[in-house]
C-alpha cells in the first residue's frame, strides 16, 4: 500500500510529460469541446388578449335612506332592533300623537260647520233665483246670494283639505321604513324631542343585496382605452365581468358586472369612478370596505405577448429581450411595451411574430454566443445554476 501511494503521483507526472491530458468532464462535442448551453424560448405570436386591470375600490350600498321625522314631538317608543332587517313600511318610531289627534278633531268640526253653512246659502240662492224672475228682489241681492253659496262651497273644500293635512300629520307620528334593508343604530332614544326641520337622521337603512363597488381609474387610462376602442384596436366587451379581492387577500366568490363610468373627473385625483354591481346574499360585503377589483376592459386583437420573466432592462431602463437569431446565436433586442396582461407584457415593437424570445438559460451569456434552443415548458423547474429570466448582455 505504501508503494502504491508513492508511485501514483510519479505515474501522473510521467503521463503529463508524455503529452497525456485527463479527459474533461462534460465534453459533449468532438475534440472535447463543450456543447452550446441550452436555453428555453417562446415563439412570438399574434393573438386576442383580454385587457384586465386591478384597481382599488370602495363598497357602497345599493340603496340608502336616512330616517327623519316629518312632524315635531317627543319619541314615545322605538319599534325595531338595531342591526335587523326591516321591510318597507314597517313602523320604526312612535311620536306623541295627542296634539295631532286634537288637530284632526278640530279640522273635522270645522268641516261640519262649513257643510252646514253651504246648505242654507244654496237654499237662499235658489229662492232668490225665483224672486228675481218676477222682479220681487233686486238683481244685486240675487247675485250676493249666489256668491255666498259659492263661498260656502269653497269653505267646505278648504276644510276638507285642512282635515286631510291633519290626518297626514297624525299618520306621520308613526315613522315607517322608507325602504327595505338593514337598519343601523338609533341616534335618538325614547324621550328625545325631534322636529321636522332637524338635520340629524334618527337612523339609516341600507340595502346591501346587491351592492355597488365604486372603482377609481385614472382618467388618462380611460382616455387611452377609449381611443384604442375608437381606432378599432380594442374590442369593447358588452357585459364585462368584474372579480373582487377582499381586504384579507381572499377572492370573493361571485362575479359582478360593470354598470357605468362617471361623466366627470375628480379634479384632485384625476380619476373617474367606475361602478360595478355585485350580489351579496350573505351580507359579507359591507359599505365602506376597501377591495381590489379585477375588471376586463376589452379585448386587444392581434396583440403580441412576451413573458415578463423574459424582459430585462438596460442601463437606461429600457426593456430588452434576448432572441435566438441566425445560426442559433443570441441577439439582444430592445422592445416597446404598452401594458401587462397577466404575467406577460403586451409588446408593440422590437419583435415580430415567429421570433424566438429566450425565457430561461441566458444567464451570463453574451451576444453572438451559440446556444441550444428548446421550447419553454412553463411547468418545468429551471435547472440548478440556470435561474429563470434573461439578463441584458454585457460587454457589447
Image (cartoon, rainbow, N blue to C red):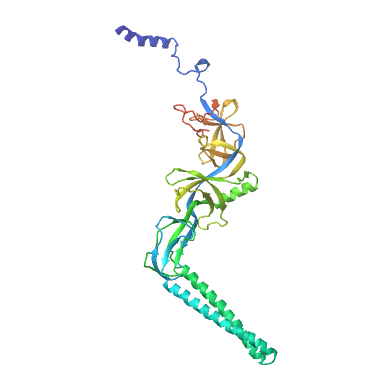
Which corner quadrant of the image does residue 303 belong to?
top right
Q: Residue at x 54, y 81 (%)?
A: 116
**Residue 93 visible in the current orientation:** yes
Image height check: is 313 above or below 153? above
Q: Nearer the viewer, residue 382 or 248?
A: 248
Image height check: is 253 above or below 41? below
Q: Nearer the viewer, residue 121 or 13?
A: 121
Q: How many callouts does the rendering have?
A: 0
x, y percent for residue 119: 58, 82
Question: Which residue is most to the right?
Answer: 134
x, y percent for residue 227: 62, 49
**Residue 295 visible in the current orientation:** no
x, y percent for residue 334: 56, 37
Which image quarter is the N terminus in? top left
Image height check: is 42 above or below 189? above
Q: Nearer the viewer, residue 136 or 143?
A: 136
Which corner quadrant of the image does residue 45 belong to?
top right
x, y percent for residue 324: 57, 29
Amino acid at each position: 500500500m505504501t508503494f502504491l501511494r508513492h508511485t501514483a503521483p510519479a505515474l501522473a507526472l510521467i503521463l503529463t510529460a508524455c503529452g497525456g491530458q485527463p479527459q474533461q468532464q462534460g465534453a459533449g462535442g468532438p475534440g472535447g469541446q463543450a456543447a452550446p448551453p441550452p436555453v428555453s424560448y417562446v415563439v412570438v405570436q399574434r393573438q386576442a388578449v383580454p385587457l384586465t386591470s386591478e384597481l382599488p375600490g370602495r363598497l357602497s350600498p345599493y340603496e340608502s335612506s336616512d330616517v327623519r321625522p316629518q312632524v315635531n314631538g317627543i319619541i314615545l317608543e322605538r319599534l325595531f332592533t338595531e342591526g335587523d332587517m326591516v321591510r318597507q313600511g314597517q313602523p320604526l318610531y312612535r311620536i306623541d300623537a295627542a296634539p295631532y289627534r286634537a288637530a284632526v278633531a278640530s279640522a273635522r268640526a270645522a268641516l261640519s260647520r262649513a257643510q252646514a253653512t253651504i246648505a242654507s246659502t244654496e237654499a237662499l240662492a235658489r229662492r232668490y233665483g225665483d224672486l228675481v224672475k218676477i222682479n220681487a228682489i233686486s238683481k244685486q241681492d240675487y247675485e250676493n246670494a249666489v256668491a255666498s253659496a259659492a263661498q260656502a262651497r269653497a269653505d267646505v273644500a278648504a276644510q276638507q283639505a285642512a282635515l286631510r293635512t291633519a290626518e297626514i300629520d297624525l299618520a306621520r307620528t308613526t315613522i315607517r321604513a322608507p325602504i327595505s334593508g338593514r337598519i343601523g343604530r338609533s341616534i335618538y332614544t325614547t324621550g328625545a324631542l325631534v322636529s321636522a326641520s332637524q338635520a340629524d337622521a334618527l337612523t339609516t337603512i341600507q340595502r346591501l343585496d346587491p351592492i355597488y363597488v365604486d372603482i377609481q381609474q385614472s382618467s388618462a387610462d380611460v382616455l387611452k382605452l377609449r381611443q384604442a376602442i375608437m381606432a378599432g384596436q380594442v374590442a369593447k366587451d358588452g357585459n364585462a365581468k368584474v372579480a373582487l379581492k377582499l381586504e384579507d387577500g381572499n377572492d370573493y366568490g361571485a362575479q359582478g358586472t360593470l354598470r357605468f363610468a362617471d361623466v366627470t373627473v375628480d379634479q384632485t385625483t384625476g380619476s373617474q369612478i367606475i361602478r360595478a354591481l355585485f350580489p351579496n346574499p350573505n351580507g359579507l360585503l359591507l359599505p365602506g370596505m376597501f377591495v381590489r377589483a379585477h375588471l376586463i376592459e376589452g379585448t386587444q386583437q392581434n396583440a403580441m405577448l412576451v413573458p415578463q420573466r423574459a424582459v430585462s432592462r438596460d442601463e437606461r431602463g429600457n426593456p430588452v429581450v434576448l432572441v435566438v437569431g441566425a445560426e442559433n446565436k443570441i441577439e439582444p433586442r430592445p422592445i416597446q411595451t404598452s401594458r401587462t396582461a397577466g404575467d406577460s407584457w403586451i409588446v408593440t415593437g422590437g419583435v415580430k411574430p415567429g421570433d424566438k424570445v429566450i425565457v430561461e438559460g441566458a444567464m451570463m451569456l453574451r451576444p453572438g454566443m451559440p446556444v441550444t434552443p428548446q421550447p419553454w415548458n412553463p411547468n418545468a423547474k429551471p435547472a440548478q445554476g440556470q435561474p429563470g429570466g434573461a439578463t441584458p448582455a454585457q460587454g457589447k
